Amino acid sequence: MFADHVAPTSRRAFGQVIEWLVWCAVVGHSERTTHVFLPLDDRGVDGIVRRVDDEAMCAVQVKGRTSLAYSEIRTVVRRTALDDPHITFVVALLDPVTITLGETVYVMDAEAVLRLGSPSSGPNGAQVELRLPYPPRPDSRWTPYACPLTDLATHLFPSAGVPPLPARAQVVASPPIAQPFVPAPPRRRELLGHLAELEVMRLLGEPPTLNTFKSFPDLEEAEYLVRHRPSGNIRGVQVKCLIVPDADFHGGVDFHGPSFAPSPLTDAVILAWREDLGGFDDHAWIIPAIDIPRFVSTEGYTFRLPLRVSETKPSRFDPYRVERAGVAAFLEARVAPAL
C-alpha cells in the first residue's frame, strides 16, 4: 500500500509516474522497434504497446505501489475490468525517493488475475485483490508471472497481440467460434463529453498557428494546453458538454471543486449537445476560469453553471457566447499577444 503520509493527489501522480516508467522500459529495453499509444479517454486500458515490424499489439493496464506490505505488492483490480479477456496487467513497484521501478515486474492476463487473486468488495464495488511477493519467491503461485523489468517487452506479446505470420501457414482445424466479448458501453454523459473534446480538438487543429497538447493524466483544471506557435504563448482549456433535449431547456455543466482554480490563463469551452438535433448546437461558450466565481460559488465538491442554448431571453452568460465554428479563432485571439 502507499505510505500513510502520501496525499491522495500524490497517489494519483505516482500512479502516472509508474505508467510512464513502464512505457519507458517497454520502449527502451525492446530489441525491436516498439511504440506506445495512450488513450484519449479512460475506458480501462492505460496504453497499447505496438511492435512495428510484425504489428503485434497488446492492450495494457498498469498497476503499482510505492511501498510493500509484509513483503508483498498489494493492489486491487476492479472486477468489471476483468470482463475484457484481451487486457494484460503489469504490476510494478516504484521507489518514490529515486523515482525508479523495481528490477522485477509481474505480467499477467485477466484469467490469471481471476484464478489466483482474492475476490473482495471495495468502495467502487467488486474487486480482486492481488498479493504479489516481492521479491518473488520460488514457492509462490505468482512466480510464473514475474519477469525482469528489462524483459518486459518480450513478455507482453506471447499471450496477447497479433503474432507474426509464418513463412508457410500450416493448415489447422478451425476452432469453435466463441461468443464475442461485448464491453459495457460508457455512460451517455461520459460518451458525449468525450465527443465534445474531440470536436474541440478538431476545431483547434484547423489553424496552422495553434498546437494543442493533452494532459496525461487528466487530473487538473486544464485538460489541454493550446500553444500559439508564432509567439510561444500558452493557454489552458477545459472542455465541457451541456446536454439538453432542445434549445429552450435550462441545463447546466458541473465542475470539480477541489481541482478548480480561477486562473486567468485557462478557458472553459462549453459545447451544447441537443438531443432533438442528435448533434452539437452551432453555438458554444468560452468562459475564462477567472470569471466563473463571479456567477456561482466554487466551494464544495462540485458546482454548476446554469446555461440555456436559446437566446430568446437575455442571460448573464451571453457575453461569452460564440459560434462553434469560431472557437479556434476566438481562442487564437486570446492566446496571441496583444498588438
Image (cartoon, grey):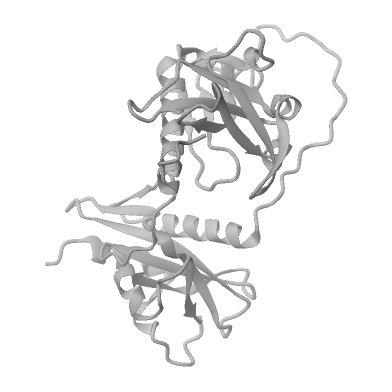
Q: Quadrant of residue 239?
A: bottom left
On the image, the x and y values in percent for residue 237 come to: 36, 59
Looking at the picture, tell me which residue is in the foreground, 84 or 125: 125
Q: Residue at x 48, y 36 (%)?
A: 2
Looking at the picture, tell me which residue is in the foreground, 277 or 213: 213
On the image, the x and y values in percent for residue 318 come to: 38, 83
Q: Is residue 116 visible?
A: yes
Look at the picture and state if 87 lies above or below 188: above
Q: Is residue 58 visible?
A: no
Apparent side of residue 300 relative to residue 165 in the rendered image (left or right): left
Q: Quadrant of residue 59?
A: top right
On the image, the x and y values in percent for residue 287 come to: 35, 72
Look at the picture and state if 145 lies above or below 245: above
Looking at the picture, tell me which residue is in the foreground, 215 or 54: 215
Q: Residue at x 72, y 48 (%)?
A: 184
Look at the picture and state if 246 lies above or below 20: below
On the image, the x and y values in percent for residue 100 come to: 38, 24
**Residue farthest to the bottom?**
313
Apparent side of residue 207 relative to residue 28 in the rendered image (left or right): left
Look at the picture and state if 154 lies above or below 49: above
Apparent side of residue 108 relative to residue 119 in the rendered image (left or right): left
Q: Residue at x 46, y 13 (%)?
A: 150
